Image (cartoon, rainbow, N blue to C red):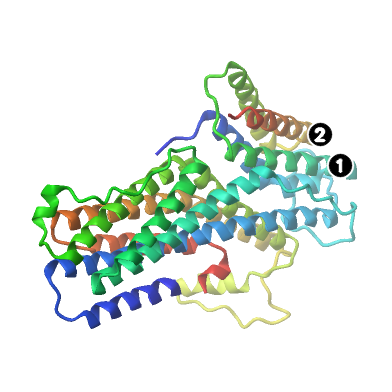
């Protein structure tokens, strides 16, 4: 059985985290604008996940590897931030970053 | 499940009227029953995943729409979010739904290809049983064409080379081991065709494992996320769940009444049930990978049975029965509730 590429694993992991914690984060969004932005970011993350599903990844591409590293770092920061929700603005900002990196990585699939 | 029972019932009926048959024909009939059962199990599983995927897309929209009425909650530093989310008036305007994503269509097409392939297999083995009973060679060949075509549709999803029919040409050595009986010869030829198509099916399943298991895991997660969201808002009560949990310890829940409902308004109850649902979600996500491996195991077992049939070895379908029972049980666990009817 073919194993998952690191790119796919990161995108899947990021989407599963965002999806599972979405309800809490939406409730805690400080303003209507922040909640709308969170919804947009969540949609972007979901679409990136579906794009990643539908594509194979070129593991040898250096640009992909760099983006993957950035996503891994952002994903780790997001998980740490979600464990301690003291800085909500930072958490919502991280979700934006993760969603953008997921979209970039998914779009690079061959 | 009903489909499987009906198809197997018909197969056994065909066996019953066939009366006294040669060992080769008896082996073919046994293989046919196993094939119908296996392909019906694969069809149940594939249909369950495909319909579950469509359901998860609707659930995603539902969960999104719930956010319009979700109140804003300010937490003190270090405070955890409350479990119970009281209903309130709309706090943001309706959220526009994003346009359909072509990537979603591609995933859906891949899942549909699996369903179509399993359906073609069911038809092929039904025809195979006819061939074993009254030499319906044309039916089997039409069925094999359908399987090859459906297998190629699935293989195209994963950029695999198409397979072609024609593996059924009987090797001279093997043909000699068989009686010159015309019907038996056609069974052997068809077996080789079906076996070749099954190998193509197996390869496509193996190549598509990662994204397909991911889709299955995601749809399980999506379903539970929505259930938890509805529970937290007080739209569901847990009386049935508590009653079912009590059965294991021979305990009964008090009769439901407006005054006695296990609902999320009590923060402790809310968290307990949420934890239970979150744990169950993780268990079912784990089951997704098992389900997929079970499908591959069933196809492997079918290939093995064809191999034994072609060599004239004895046929035992006990292992296949166990695999199918496992596949059906996991598919039922993963599918939407209405699929269990």
Q: Is residue B83 left or right of residue B51?
A: right
Q: Residue at x 53, y 52 (%)?
A: B111
Q: Is residue B94 left or right of residue B124?
A: right
Percent from the top left, x then y, of residue A91? 75, 34
Chain to which the residue tagged by mark 1 belongs: A
Residue placed under numbered mark 1 in the picture: A30
* Pick the front one: B250 or B156: B156
Q: Is residue B238 left or right of residue B95?
A: left
Can the viewer see residue B104 in this picture? yes
Mark 1 burial class by Cα count in 10 Å: few <14, some 14-19, many 20+ = some
Residue placed under numbered mark 2 in the picture: A89
Quick check: B199 above or below B316? above
Percent from the top left, x then y, of residue A31? 89, 43
Quick check: B311 above or below B10? above
Q: Is residue A64 left or right of residue B38?
A: right
Percent from the top left, x then y, of residue A43? 74, 43
* Pick the front one: B238 or A62: A62
Quarter that holds the N terminus of chain B:
bottom left
The part of the image, by quadrant, that contains residue B21 is: bottom left
Percent from the top left, x then y, of residue A86? 76, 35
């Amino acid at each position: 059985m073919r194993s998952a590429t690191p790119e796919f694993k990161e995108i899947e992991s990021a989407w599963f985290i965002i999806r599972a914690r979405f309800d809490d984060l939406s409730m805690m969004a400080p303003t209507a604008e922040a909640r709308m932005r969170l919804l947009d970011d969540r949609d972007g993350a979901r679409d990136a996940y579906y794009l990643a599903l539908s594509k194979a990844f070129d593991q040898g591409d250096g640009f992909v590897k760099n983006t993957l590293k950035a996503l891994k770092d952002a994903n780790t920061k997001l998980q740490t931030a979600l464990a301690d929700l003291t800085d909500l603005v930072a958490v919502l900002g991280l979700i934006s970053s993760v969603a953008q990196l997921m979209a970039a990585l998914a779009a690079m699939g061959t | 499940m009903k489909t499987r029972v009906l198809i197997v019932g018909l197969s056994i009926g065909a066996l019953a009227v066939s009366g006294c048959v040669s060992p080769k024909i008896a082996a073919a009939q046994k293989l046919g029953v196993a094939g119908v059962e296996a392909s019906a199990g694969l069809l149940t599983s594939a249909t369950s995943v495909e319909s579950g995927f469509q359901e998860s897309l609707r659930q995603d929209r539902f969960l999104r729409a719930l956010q319009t009425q979700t109140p804003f909650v300010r937490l003190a530093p270090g405070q955890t979010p409350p479990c119970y989310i009281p209903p309130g008036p709309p706090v943001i305007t309706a959220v526009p739904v994003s346009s359909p994503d072509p990537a979603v269509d591609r995933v859906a097409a891949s899942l549909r290809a699996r369903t179509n392939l399993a359906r073609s297999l069911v038809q092929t083995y039904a025809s195979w049983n006819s061939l074993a009973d009254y030499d319906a060679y044309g039916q089997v060949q039409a069925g094999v064409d359908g399987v090859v075509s459906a297998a190629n549709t699935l293989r195209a999803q994963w950029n695999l080379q198409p397979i072609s029919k024609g593996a059924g040409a009987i090797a001279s050595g093997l043909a000699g081991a068989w009686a010159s009986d015309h019907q038996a010869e056609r069974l052997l030829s068809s077996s080789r065709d079906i076996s070749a198509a099954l190998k193509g099916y197996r390869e496509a399943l193996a190549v598509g494992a990662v994204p397909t298991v991911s889709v299955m895991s995601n749809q399980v997660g999506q379903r539970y996320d929505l259930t938890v969201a509805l529970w937290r808002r007080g739209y569901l009560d847990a009386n049935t769940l508590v009653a079912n949990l009590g059965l294991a310890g021979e305990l009964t829940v008090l009769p439901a009444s407006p005054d006695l409902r296990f609902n999320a308004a009590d923060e402790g109850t809310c968290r307990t049930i949420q934890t239970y649902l979150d744990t169950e979600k993780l268990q079912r996500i784990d089951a997704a990978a098992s389900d997929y491996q079970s499908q591959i195991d069933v196809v492997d077992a079918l290939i093995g049975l064809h191999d034994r049939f072609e060599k004239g070895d004895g046929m035992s379908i006990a292992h296949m029965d166990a695999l199918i029972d496992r596949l059906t049980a996991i598919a039922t666990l993963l599918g939407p509730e209405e699929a269990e009817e």
